[in-house]
């Protein structure tokens, strides 16, 4: 049986994915942070790892680096709600197999793991990214700043250099599709 470790600080999301993978016959390990994940990887040697990029403390990129040192053939898919081309490229360079934006369901994740890994080693050729629109890039930047400010709109507006009400109007709009 295939085994997978799910590393995400969002408990509900991680538990939901764990249940879905278990129902499909996978042996599932769960971790909420990088240190816990490294312990589980060293003790269980999973076949696959699904890693969230942004977690408290060390990031998913740190986990990729350390896990690949211990278990070089571990197949890693990075899943994040704060994706950018730069972090995706960095994850691929560190040894991630694929990079998925949240939200993603189990079928998306399984497809990512089963993608052909015999592509060229050059990360720029391996990653297939669409350049986001200016509106999408702005939306992602606002979301990152807001997250860094613990969802405090006033603090985020100050960091962004815009008025608080302007930020509220931008947040009221739905995220651009591309």
Image (cartoon, grey):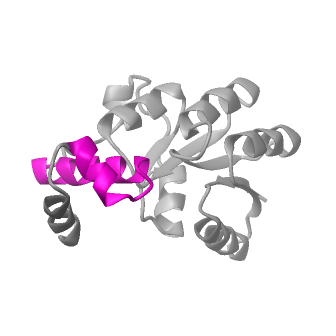
**Residue that protrudes farthest toward the right in the picture:** 43
Q: Nearer the viewer, residue 174 or 29?
A: 174
Residue 116 appears anywhere in the view: no
> Above or below — where is 93 with respect to 15?
above
Spot occupied by residue 53 in the image (x, y as percentages of width and height): 51, 44
Which residue does the image show at 46% across and 32% down from the upper left? 92
Residue 134 located within the stretch drawn in magenta: yes
Which residue does the image show at 48% across and 53% down from the upper left? 112
Which residues fall within the magenta stretch?
133-160
Quadrant into which the C terminus falls = bottom left
Spot occupied by residue 98 in the image (x, y as percentages of width and height): 47, 43
Q: Nearer the viewer, residue 145 or 100?
A: 145
Which residue does the image show at 72% across and 46% down from the upper left? 47
In this rendering, would 28 be left or right of 153? right
> Above or below — where is 126 with respect to 161?
above
Which residue does the image show at 46% across and 63% down from the upper left? 108
Spot occupied by residue 55 in the image (x, y as percentages of width and height): 57, 47
Spot occupied by residue 118 in the image (x, y as percentages of width and height): 48, 34
- Quadrant of the rendered image containing residue 169: bottom left
Residue 18 located within the stretch drawn in magenta: no
In this rendering, would 87 be left or right of 176? right
Residue 88 appears anywhere in the view: yes
- Quadrant of the rendered image containing residue 18: bottom right
Q: Provide the major secondary structure of the magenta segment.
A: helix
Q: Nearer the viewer, residue 37 or 112?
A: 37
In this rendering, would 119 be left or right of 162? right
> Above or below — where is 156 with respect to 57?
below
- Quadrant of the rendered image containing residue 42: top right
């Amino acid at each position: 049986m295939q085994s997978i470790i799910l590393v995400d600080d969002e408990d509900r999301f991680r538990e939901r994915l764990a249940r879905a993978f278990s129902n499909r016959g996978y042996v599932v390990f769960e971790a909420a942070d990088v240190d816990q994940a490294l312990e589980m990887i060293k003790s269980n040697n999973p076949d696959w790892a699904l890693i969230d990029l942004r977690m408290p403390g060390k990031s998913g990129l740190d986990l990729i680096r350390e896990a690949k040192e211990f278990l070089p053939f571990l197949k890693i898919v990075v899943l994040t709600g704060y994706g950018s081309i730069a972090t995706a490229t960095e994850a691929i360079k560190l040894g991630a197999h694929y990079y998925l934006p949240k939200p993603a369901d189990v079928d998306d994740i399984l497809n990512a793991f089963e993608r052909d890994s015999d592509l060229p080693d050059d990360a720029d050729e391996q990653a297939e990214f669409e350049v986001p629109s200016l509106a999408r890039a702005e939306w992602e930047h606002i979301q990152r700043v807001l997250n860094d400010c613990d969802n405090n709109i006033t603090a985020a507006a100050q960091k962004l250099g815009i008025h608080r009400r302007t930020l509220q109007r931008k947040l009221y709009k739905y995220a651009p599709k591309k």
